Image (tube, rainbow, N blue to C red):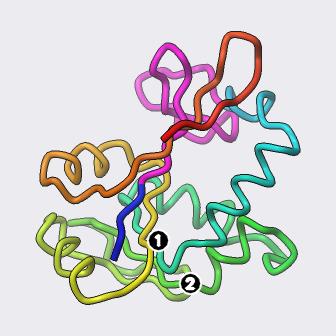
Amino acid sequence: MKLTTITNVSVDGVMQGLGLTDEDRRGGFERGGWALPLVDEETMTRLGEVYGRADAFLFGRRTYEIFAASWGAMADPQDDPVAAPLHVRPKYVVSKTLTDPGWAHTTVLAGDPAAVRELKERMPGELQVHGSGQLVRRLAAEGLIDEMLLLTGELDGQVGMAR
């Protein structure tokens, strides 16, 4: 299984709280929702394509909980190109503390990169990691990432995507 990470990061290196103003307030972070004003129709189309090609998703616990509370709570996910794949495809969470995931099709993996390595070896297709900065760093250190996509907020107020 190919492991692809998709990371939204500002030019000055911020990954935190990109979607909603109160999404992730750790450490007194007050710039929540910084990415949404930069996302245009073209970016959403591209993101829909990226999510659509995933065969499964892998998250760290914190990102999983954020996604489950937003994308997982959508009333009609089948009508959204991002939410639809998230609802119907397998989701894996690397966590030592999560015991009862509430989102359908979710499996908790031990908080160990070996579990991810095993998953990659036994399944075909593409496994995507969205956000999950701490997990991405661990996966990179273990040499488990095959492709990295970066969505960056550029100085002209646009979002760019790079491999």
Residue located at (69% from left, 54% from top): 47
Q: Residues within 10 Å of mark 2 (few under 14, many from 20)?
A: some
Q: Which residue is mark 1?
A: 57
Find numbered disc 1 in the image and state the secondary structure of the residue it sits on.
strand
Q: Quadrant of residue 108?
A: bottom left
Q: Which residue is mark 2?
A: 89
Q: Nearer the viewer, residue 25 or 38?
A: 38
Residue located at (78% from left, 70% from top): 74
- In the rendering, at what x and y percent does residue 72 appear? 66, 71
Furthest toward the front, the residue is 163
- In the rendering, at what x and y percent does residue 16 appear? 50, 33
In magenta, the rendered stretch is 5-32
What is the three-letter code of the residue carrying label 2? Arg
Where is 40 relative to 3, above or below? above
Residue located at (58% from left, 28% from top): 152
Mark drawn on residue 147: none
